[in-house]
Amino acid sequence: MTKNLLLAWWTLAISTPILSQGVSLNTTQSPAHESAMLDVSSNNRGLLIPRLTKTERDAIQSPATALLIFNADSKQFQVNTGTSLMPVWQTIVSVLPAETSTAFWQTGGNKNLVDSSFIGSSDSKSLSFKTNSFLRLYIDSVNTKIGIGTNTPRTSLEIATTDALIVPVGTTGQRPATPVVGMIRFNSNTNKLEGFTTTGWVALH
């Protein structure tokens, strides 16, 4: 052990309150919180963890489960969720480019959005929406098609179910003020499906 290492250890030992519940690192001599083995606090400094390239990360001998590193290549915080023999490096935080660094969508809703905000991909990858691990909505970016309940839509919109599709329902007086050719609705006055054509609204059956 070198003199510098001994000095660093001794400095840490005399400046750090070491209590039965854990270790605290601070400048106020405050004890560690009872729920923490290591309690680091500061009002002008941060916690800096090891920065490794992917090659350096993969060269770690038997990395412990829960080992945390910062991947300097991908700019991501990663943690080993596997085992020492079979490590699985899971990304927990990505550092995005400066122009998108504030574009994190929150599950509780978002505010202060700009006109360019969007949910989706910025490349040619298709997008899937799932609930309970089952596919509900699929957007095929290659063929510009949307599938509901299917990831192989054969038309611009395919609904892969066996029930039915409910179209807008309204009275004659509730027809769109500026109809467009191709519109379909159910007229609750006539009890008929109707569509808008070049000659106006016509019954479809």
Image (tube, grey):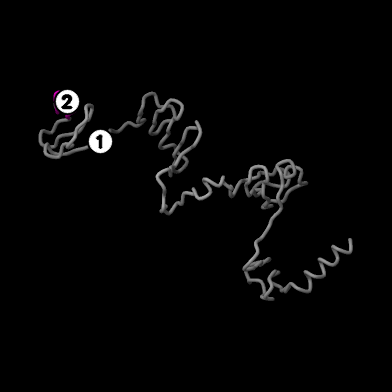
In the image, which disc is placed on residue 204? 2
Q: What secondary structure prevails in the magenta region?
A: strand
Residue 126 in the image: x percent, y percent?
47, 32
Residue 191 in the image: x percent, y percent?
13, 33
Quarter of the figure with residue 186: top left
Q: Quadrant of the C terminus?
A: top left
Residue 43, above or below 143 = below
Q: Please, what is the three-letter code of the amino acid marked with disc 1?
A: Ile
Q: Is residue 196 magenta?
A: yes
Task: Read off the magenta span.
Answer: 194-201
Residue 79, above or below 4 = above
The single residue placed furthest to the right in the displayed view is 2
User: Which residue: 71% across, 74% down?
Assistant: 19
Q: Quadrant of the N terminus?
A: bottom right
In the image, which disc is placed on residue 55? none
Looking at this view, is 108 or 178 the one in front?
A: 178
Residue 92 in the image: x percent, y percent?
59, 49
Looking at this view, is 21 or 71 the one in front?
A: 71
Quarter of the figure with residue 201: top left
